[in-house]
């Protein structure tokens, strides 16, 4: 008992740790300086983004579940995504399956989530041995919205170029992994935000979703025969709050779900990860704290800005939102494609190279406009009013 007390008490005094970056191709290892940030801030988060091929929202339930839940919990049992939603819709499109590449073959490993155009958030123990801290395999690959043993035909898989993790990471306070991908697949899938919130009561009020790949048959926990090839979801409220963890009492995860995010969802307004699964018991997620947040945010911001400058990406914007008759496009591009979709993903209007879109014949409601050139695609939502 004394050992356990000392073990968990050491978590409560965790200090900020430096980020280590490992290049999987060159095997070079570097250590980054700690990021300076405003330590008086009690919350912060990044923003989500729709993708060019995942340009409409999944109609996720906003109701606190009252059935299909374990006794004493407010979180549902796992359900197959395909039974309820289109895996190509946002934010389901951002859920990824992590593979190791061993002897030319893909080996199922963990779960993760896209948090940038070419960045995936997961858990360090999904890539490294806990005791030796050595990488399981030299090569890693992720596949977004992988389901029923197949890649999603709308999106591409990508190898991992680099991994970012915390120096002397442990399951107790720093079980986080940021993976940099070879390909900017996030522009197709979209990505969710991630953040920290110091006020437990605010976290307690949110509704959360999990998207993951359970991979083991555990009849004492769940009668389903999971094998890691199918995307599942569950949702509800969290009720376990510790300095380094957030979780769900009276509930358990399954191996294969490690690294999956606990995502605060306010449909069409917020999709934010506040932690990644470390321990299956009581769905115990390593809680994103301020130093974790700003360390990873600085990496994504700096690398993404470099990529944008390097590829001369064009940033589109729209005016007159809400609008009754026209939507105006602001861009310096001469050649681009415009597509307008309804909430079900139906393409209602298409135009090319025009900066004024006539929408007077559309019924009032919420729509999405996608603007595409030969380098980038941007999606926005707008409201049509009478």
Image (tube, rainbow, N blue to C red):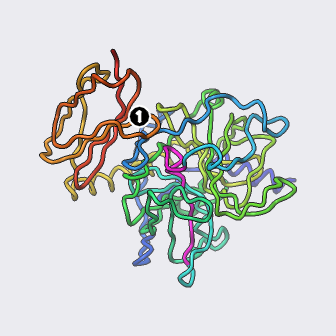
Q: How many marks?
A: 1
- Residue 28 occupies quadrant: bottom left
| Image coordinates for residue 179, horizontal then vertical, percent | 47, 61
Q: Residue at x 50, y 68 (%)?
A: 141
Left or right of 45, for residue 378:
left
Left or right of 172, for residue 87:
left
Is residue 190 a member of the stretch shown in magenta? Answer: no
Q: Residue at x 41, y 51 (%)?
A: 116
Residue range highlighted in magenta? 87-101
For disc 1, the neighbor class at 10 Å (few under 14, some 14 to 19, many from 20) is some
- Residue 99 occupies quadrant: bottom right
120 or 166: which is nearer to us? 120
Is residue 88 a member of the stretch shown in magenta? Answer: yes
Q: Determine which residue is flagged by label 1.
A: 342
Residue 21 vertical placement versus 136 (above, below): above
Q: Residue furthest top?
A: 386
108 or 9: which is nearer to us? 108
Residue 325 vertical placement versus 269 (above, below): above
Left or right of 26, for residue 73:
right
Left or right of 74, for residue 120:
left
Q: Residue at x 37, y 63 (%)?
A: 183
| Image coordinates for residue 267, horizontal then vertical, percent | 52, 32
| Image coordinates for residue 288, horizontal then vertical, percent | 56, 45
Q: Residue at x 24, y 55 (%)?
A: 375
């Amino acid at each position: 008992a004394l050992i356990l007390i000392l073990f968990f008490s050491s978590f409560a005094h965790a200090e900020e740790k430096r980020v280590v970056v490992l290049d999987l191709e060159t095997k070079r290892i570097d250590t980054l300086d700690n990021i300076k940030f405003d330590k008086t801030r009690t919350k912060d988060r990044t923003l989500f983004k729709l993708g060019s091929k995942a340009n409409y929202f999944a109609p996720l339930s906003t109701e606190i579940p009252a059935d299909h839940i374990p006794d004493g919990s407010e979180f549902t049992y796992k359900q197959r995504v395909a039974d309820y939603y289109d895996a190509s819709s946002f934010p389901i499109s951002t859920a990824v399956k992590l593979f190791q590449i061993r002897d030319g073959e893909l080996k199922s490993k963990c779960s993760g989530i896209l948090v940038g155009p070419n960045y995936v958030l997961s858990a360090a123990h999904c890539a490294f041995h806990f005791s030796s801290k050595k990488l399981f395999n030299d090569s890693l690959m992720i596949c977004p919205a992988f389901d029923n043993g197949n890649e999603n035909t709308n999106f591409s898989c990508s190898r991992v170029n680099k991994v970012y993790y915390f120096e002397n990471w442990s399951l107790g306070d720093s079980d986080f992994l940021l993976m940099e991908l070879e390909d900017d697949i996030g522009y197709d899938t979209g990505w969710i935000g991630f953040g920290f919130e110091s006020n437990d009561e605010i976290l307690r009020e949110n509704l959360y979703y999990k998207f993951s790949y359970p991979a083991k048959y555990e009849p004492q926990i769940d009668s389903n025969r999971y094998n890691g090839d199918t995307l599942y979801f569950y949702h509800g409220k969290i009720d376990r709050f510790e300095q380094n963890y957030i979780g769900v009492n009276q509930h358990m995860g399954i191996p294969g779900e490690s690294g999956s995010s606990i995502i605060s969802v306010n449909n069409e307004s917020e999709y934010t990860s506040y932690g990644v699964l470390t321990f299956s018991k009581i769905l115990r997620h390593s809680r994103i704290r301020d130093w974790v947040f700003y360390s990873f945010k600085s990496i994504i911001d700096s690398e993404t800005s470099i990529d944008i400058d390097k590829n001369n990406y064009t940033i589109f914007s729209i005016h007159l939102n809400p609008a009754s008759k026209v939507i105006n496009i602001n861009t310096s591009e001469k050649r681009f494609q415009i597509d307008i979709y309804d909430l079900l993903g139906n393409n209602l209007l298409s135009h090319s190279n025009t900066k004024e879109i006539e929408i007077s014949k559309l019924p009032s409601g919420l729509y999405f406009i996608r603007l595409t050139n030969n380098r980038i695609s941007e999606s926005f939502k707008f409201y049509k009013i009478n």
